[in-house]
Image (cartoon, coloured by chain):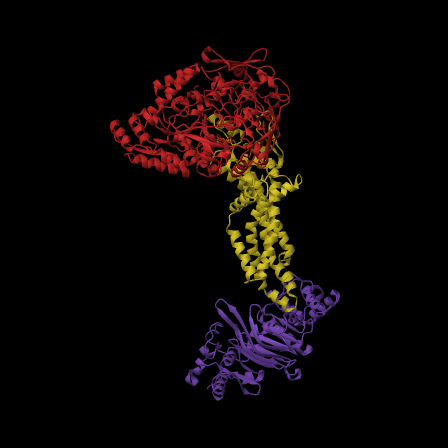
Amino acid sequence: MASMGTRRVLTAGMAAAMLVTACGGATTTPSPAAPSASTGAPSSAPAASTSASTSTAPSASTAASTPPTGGTLYLLTNAQQFDQVDPQRAYTGEDMAFFNGTIYRSLEQFTFSSDFSTAAKLTPDLATDTGTATDGGKTWAFTLRDGATFQDGSPVTCADVKYGISRTFATDVINQGPTYAIQYLDIPTDPKDGSSMYKGPYKGTGQDLYDKAVTCSPDNKTITFHLNQPLGDWNYATTLGMSPVPKAADTGETYGQPGHLAVSSGPYMVDSYQTGNGGKMVLVRNPKWNASSDPYHHAYVDKWEVDFGLDPKVIDQRLIQSSGNDEFAMDYPAVQPENLSIVFKDASTPNDQFVGRALSGMDVYARYLWIDTTKIPNVKIRQAMAVALDRSAMRKNLGGDFYGDYADGLIKPTVGLDYAPTNLWTSLLGQPIPDNGDAAFAKTLIQQSGVAAPSLTYDFPNTPTNAKNAALVQSSLQAVGFTIKLNPIEPGKYYSVVFGAGAHEFGPAGWGADWPNASTVIPPLLTKKGGWDLSRVDDAAFNAKVAAALAETDRTKQSADWQALNVEAVQNMWIIPTFFGLTQRLAGDKVGGVYLWGPYSSWPYGDMYVKQ
Amino acid sequence: MILLLFLLTVAVFLLFSILPGDPARLTCGKSCTPDIIEANRHRLGLDKPPLEQYEAFIGGIFFGREFSEDSPQPVICNAPCLGYSYNRHAQVLGLIVNAFPVTFWLATGAFILWITTGISLGILAALTHGRWPDRLVMTLSLIGYSLPAFFIGLVLMFFVIIKWRWLPFPSYVSPFDNLGQFLQTMLLPWIVLAVLYTAFYMRLTRNQVLETFGEDYVRTARAKGLPERTVVVKHALRAGLAPIVTAAGLDLAGLLGGAIISENIFSLPGLGSLSLNAVTDSDLPLLAGITLCTATFIIVANLVVDLLYAVIDPRVRLGS
Amino acid sequence: MTTPAAAQRPFLSVNNLSVAFPTEDGLVRAVDGVSFSVEKGQTLAVVGESGSGKSVTAQAIMGLINRKSAKITGEIWLDDQELVRLPASDVQALRGDQMAMIFQDPMSSLHPFYRIGDQIIEAVQVHRNVSKKQARRETIDMLRRVGIPAVERRVDDYPHQLSGGMRQRVMIAMALINSPSLLIADEPTTALDVTVQAQIMELIASIQDEFKITVILITHDLGVVADVADEVAVMYGGRVVERAPTSVLYLKPEMPYTLGLLSSIPRMDKEMDRLDPIPGNPPSPINLPAGCVFQPRCFYWSQVPDDLCKTTRPELLSTGPDHLVRCHLAPDVRREITAKVLSELAGVPS
């Protein structure tokens, strides 16, 4: 629901990685969430359309027969290590998908399915059900299953879950992770700086406040959360950074790192972890894991090995060859641009030899242009900007078909239920708008606006691709009468500039939902208290509808609400949707369970197996 | 020497203190709020005045220090403590010590390769000055010189590993654990690294030796009636190769600081990879530690080279 | 070619020797048809400016010119061996043994990395099968003989620890260590202080007396020749332009170039207003003039009819007993010029 913090923003590292992926070069950060999120540059804003070529993953686990067990699966990554292994600190989509699928259990998890809508639904993991909301959504209770244990055999109790979550409050030690607990638990904040009065379990300051906000039943089986506002989807928030940690094993800063390996609650445990080039993380079966307590994890394979520090091009070559152990390997970063034509016929179809082990599907990011609605209050002018935009040239510049599909709104099909076509580019504005823009229609809209086409400045992070895109924005908008100035910004400072007083009229941005609910999209991007409102939208009527949608506990009704709000947003052209990013993945030919898993746009680790 | 090292620590410290970019912000992550940045600043010790930070840094080297005091298990960094990388959750010294053997094997292997081939081909060229072996060697040198390491590396990798499959994909192991795999992994990096240096040393050797061939004392040696072989080996080469010792010593020391390109192409977990990753991650403590170590190598190498030169050249030893 | 009987030949005789180096700019004729001879025990001084070919001639005799990089023609007879056609290894065996050489710059002619004693011992052992101990003893004796003080201590010094004069003495000791019959001294004093110069020349003279060896003294300074040499060959542009016994050359030179050299000798015995260096520069060995190579710098060529000096190379012709001159000027004209110039030098008004 209403989320205040910055969510899965398209970060500097990510933007770089994505753009490079699209136009040819090596990625240095394999993961969508590079650690330098706060200084992130956006992706350049590309074009939009409704051609949502949804992941055409060969669905592997839909067969009725149970996949075989045993074997080892390998992950090949160019990263030197995991950004974080600590369950309260990991915040990279692929990493969370991997850990949650192997070593960590969580109250709730996303469902394994190649279908985005199904995958977006919760499956209870540690909890017996998807949680019970009372008090209009201000209080949430979850009951823990019997038989769940840590790798030392001790049972996972409410206290362990509660302790794990409490670590998030120790922001001086446990940083970089999701902070929903801080935002939504009913704990007073310091009026001076807005920080929580609870300082985490290490300092212990405000422990009584936390103990009131999160309570355990006398049998240590039921955990109850008291929130500071009604939240219809707090159970979704529990998928992020709320796994249990046994207090006795907590080493704080070093928890999960080599020498201080994380304690598993899942079907696998960390056997060894060395970082750097040539380093490995090896997961073996957790002998104390009790399958009957865990209907969520399939745990088909016996062993997982993550190989660090490999050149991305080498990873591609090994997977293309798929010989030896590489038959059982899969990429952790995406396929490099120069190899896409080897693996794929087109943006959605693998070449014959790669069918069943190559994927091209949506990543979690929607890209758009924000427009400062206080500087450009006239909706017709904003629409004219969108109509004039040559999105096809921008897409070509960004990498063409493989880069992404034309976006028709902020909600991406990966969000699942909440996505519905907005028809923005086909009929929403009264007539279809071609991908390369419609100058005549744009001029008509300017006439209808009753004002002259204004002079605008386009802010953008100064990378080669973004600069080229900026020129495309400039030329296509100037063709219909706008005067466009370009303002290149040092990539690392882009977001701090455009959020500050130095922002001009419009610029590119990108956003990914934290969980498959548009509550992590519409409110942060389009309401003042959302925290990522680059367009400076503050519309009282809209805010009221958002609040209603957030409080809606009927998920079907809520979906309809979000869909309508998405349409309203593009109709008002508060943002110009440009692209739904694509990602391309490749696995060896003996890897089973190959499909793009919507919630993290990742491999479905907990559902993968070795083919016989 | 000690003074130099001291000045080095000051320089490194200043360099990394005044660098743009706020480490506290860089390590803050996605969900970054002002209070979290403040917490980070405190955690990194950046809220203390610079002099105090420097004292802590130097104090760490001599007496060790503690990081992340608020953590249930503070990170104890024993002397000599070069700092703690919050990106990697590891002590800088430990990271360097782990990476160093890889770089050491890479550098020394390549060093032996290029010194032997470079010097022998250089001598060959000098002895056949103006004739075809000389021209061949000089052409090879020019080619070797103009090929960027990453290009040779990728080409070799493509043909030898990917296309022809003569060698498996590189995966570093210690030579003491699996010598075969070690050699298979290191062969191409050695060659790649050696190509550039061989090109340089062929040329250097040739020019040095040719220069000494023109020296009066070589003519004297001939006038004594010494056989040509003695003239070349004992009189010309001995003097001609002395300056090469200097170059070789410094090059080796530089390489011990990490061969960034080769290590990355072949996924070798050495200091070069480590520093590159430190740069891309803006991991300032690690970067400072590596810089300090590399600079120390070079200072020490300078000293060793000077001593070695004194052994070779009595003019240096005895003063002229 | 018939080989003359050994008895009829001088100890060293150079016949029509030419040395040419092919370079990118063309063939450098450093030495072009040089002939001279020296009797056993005699001293021949070869005099000329730098670039006259005198050092190349000396190195050709020693076999120090790389036969691969230079074209050497003519004959060099040492005793009864012809060196130009002798296999390089045989010449090498003679070098440092039968014939030895000392060089202009004693600073750079000794190897900086080796002790002086060892450098001499090396010369002994390469030619004679003697023990290191014996070689060292001989070395010490020889160093003492050439005037090195405190020899026992100095013998293990490195070259840079010695003065220039001492180093040249070491070079001389090294040259003499195998009792050569021919010693070539190439500008042995040029790099030394004036006072030391005299000592070294004295040493060479005394050695010659003592060892009865044949000496070729290469110099650009006609002044040092007078006391030492029996005969003088003046070289210019790679050729011998005048050859005469020392006394004859000093008193009755006939070649204008020799006159020029004599005029440029500073004299201690009389006050002089000026030295008369020869104006102009030596010819480039690549583009030699078609006529007399000295013609461009000669004051007197216009006294020869028909521009003969510009068009025709003069031959080296006899003009008196043992006196050869290469000049188109008529003999009486030459003598008249000489008399005039020498009297001017002597201060007698003409």
Q: Is residue A205 visible?
A: yes
Provide residue A308's location: percent of width, then percent of height: 56, 34
Q: Nearer the viewer, residue A396 or C12?
A: A396
**x then y, percent, for residue C185:** 61, 73
Residue appearing at x 49%, y 77% in the figure: C275
Vertical side of C159 occupied by C51: above or below? below
Whether residue A225 is situated above or below residue C119 in the rendered picture:
above
Q: Colour of chain A?
A: red
Chain painted in yellow in the figure: B
How many numbered callouts?
0
Q: Quadrant of residue C114?
A: bottom right
Q: Could you tell me which residue is drawn at 60 percent across and 37 percent down?
A: B93
Between residue B125 and residue C148, name the one nearer to us: B125
Q: Is residue A4 visible?
A: no
Find residue B276 and report its horizontal and vertical position in percent.
53, 39
User: Looking at the image, is C258 positioned above or below residue A447?
Assistant: below
How far across and down, in percent of the image, does residue C8 sit? 64, 84
Q: Quadrant of the N terminus of chain C?
A: bottom right
The picture quadrant where one finds residue C10 is: bottom right
Relative horizontal placement of residue A551, taking residue A158 as reference (left or right): left
Q: Is residue C213 left or right of residue B257?
A: right
Seen in the image, is A344 located left or right of residue C38? left
* A468 relative to B205, above or below: above
**Quick one: which chain is purple?**
C
